[in-house]
Image (cartoon, helix red, strand yellow):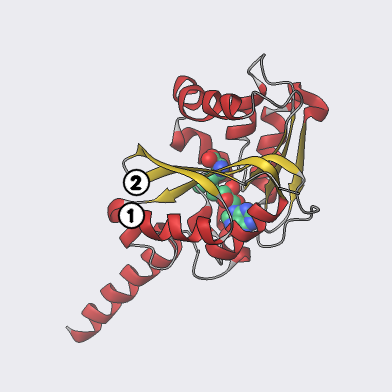
């Protein structure tokens, strides 16, 4: 009987480690490997609604960037190019997007989906822990449904802020509700998120409910004063 209980607990632990938290506590290579394995099913499982993507992601981003004629956007953990496609399909968006992800298979699908946008989308296989860009490069940096899978979300936010230009906009998602409780140390309360972003020098922080288990978090990097 005791062995049965131990086996059940072990199975539950493995399920939490590999399925619920998608390998987030085992390091970036494991997360990327799991995404490589499931990439083909990703879009079918997620069933993104183009109208929702437009309303909650593309339109507010366009509004935030309306003073920049040719915006440069970095989408961290871009997956199958959900956010780049939402943005690039808008005729009003004249800019370019860099999509960064560690999973080769997710990027292969992103490449296929976004082929029609040619050089306006540039995909890079890279760990989000170290963004290979100079300080103050992008007009917007985004990270959708991914912060909690990164080895160190705080450090990742610091990197995203570093490559954001003064005046630029940051958009990230934060896990909330019961799903956040299943990922200790990977999600933030609203107070923690605000304090963290402020400590990174970000301002105009807006946190809004998006999905049952995700908030959208918007912030601006202040213009430099001389
Ligand atoms: C839930 S998906 C979200 C993808 C996309 N942003 C979206 O909204 O559909 C999480 C993504 O994070 C990527 N990812 C996980 N850890 C990463 C890391 N350390 N560096 C870069 N990408 C990572 C995964 O490969 C996967 O594509």
> What residue sits right under mark 1 in the picture?
179
Residue situated in front as seen by the camera: 80 or 210: 210
Left or right for 110, reference 41: right
Q: In the rendered view, tell whether residue 65 sits above or below residue 141.
A: above
Percent of width and height locating residue 109: 66, 37
Instruction: Characterize the local packing of mark 2: few (<14), some (14-19) or many (20 or more) Cα atoms within 10 angstroms.
Output: some
From this viewpoint, which residue is outermost toward the front?
226
The furthest residue to the left? 1
**Mark sitting on residue 204:** none
Q: Residue at x 71, y 48 (%)?
A: 225
**Residue 114 position (above or below residue 20):** above
- Is residue 45 at all visible to an observer of this figure? yes
Q: Is mark 2 within 8 Å of ligand 1?
A: no
Q: Taking the image as drawn, is residue 32 in sight?
A: no
Crowd band around label 1 with a 10 angstrom C-alpha radius: few (<14), some (14–19), many (20+): some
Name the mark on residue 213.
Answer: 2
Front-lying residue, 134 or 221: 221
Q: Position of residue 112 (x, y in %)?
A: 71, 31
**Do the residues bearing badges 2 and 1 touch, measured as CB atoms within 8 Å?**
yes
Q: Residue at x 44, y 54 (%)?
A: 194
Tag 1, which secondary structure?
helix
Residue found at x 37% / y 53%: 190
Q: Quadrant of residue 95?
A: top right
In this picture, is 33 found above or below 48? Answer: below
2 on left or right of 225 = left
* Quadrant placement of the N terminus: bottom left
The kind of secondary structure element at disc 2 is loop
Between the C-alphas of marks 2 and 1, the distance is 6 Å
Who is closer to the viewer here, 89 or 134? 134
């Amino acid at each position: 009987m005791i062995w049965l209980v131990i086996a059940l607990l072990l199975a539950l632990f493995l399920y939490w480690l590999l399925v619920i938290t998608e390998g987030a506590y085992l390091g970036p290579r494991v997360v990327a490997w799991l995404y490589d394995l499931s990439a083909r099913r990703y879009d079918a499982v997620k069933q993104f609604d183009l109208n929702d993507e437009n309303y909650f992601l593309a339109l507010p981003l366009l509004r935030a960037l309306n003073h920049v004629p040719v915006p440069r956007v970095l989408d961290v953990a871009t997956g199958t190019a959900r956010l780049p496609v939402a943005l690039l399909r808008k005729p009003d968006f004249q800019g370019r997007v860099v999509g960064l992800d560690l999973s080769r298979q997710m990027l292969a699908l992103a490449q296929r989906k976004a082929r029609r946008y040619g050089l306006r989308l540039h995909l890079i296989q890279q760990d989000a822990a170290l963004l290979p860009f100079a300080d103050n490069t992008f007009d917007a940096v985004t990270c959708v449904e991914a912060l909690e899978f990164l080895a160190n979300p705080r450090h990742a936010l610091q990197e995203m802020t570093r490559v954001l230009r003064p005046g630029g906009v940051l958009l990230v998602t934060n896990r909330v509700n019961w799903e956040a409780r299943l990922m200790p140390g990977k999600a933030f309360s609203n107070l923690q998120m605000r304090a963290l972003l402020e400590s990174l020098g970000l301002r105009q922080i807006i946190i809004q409910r998006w999905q049952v288990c995700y908030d959208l978090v918007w912030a601006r990097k202040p213009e430099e004063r001389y």
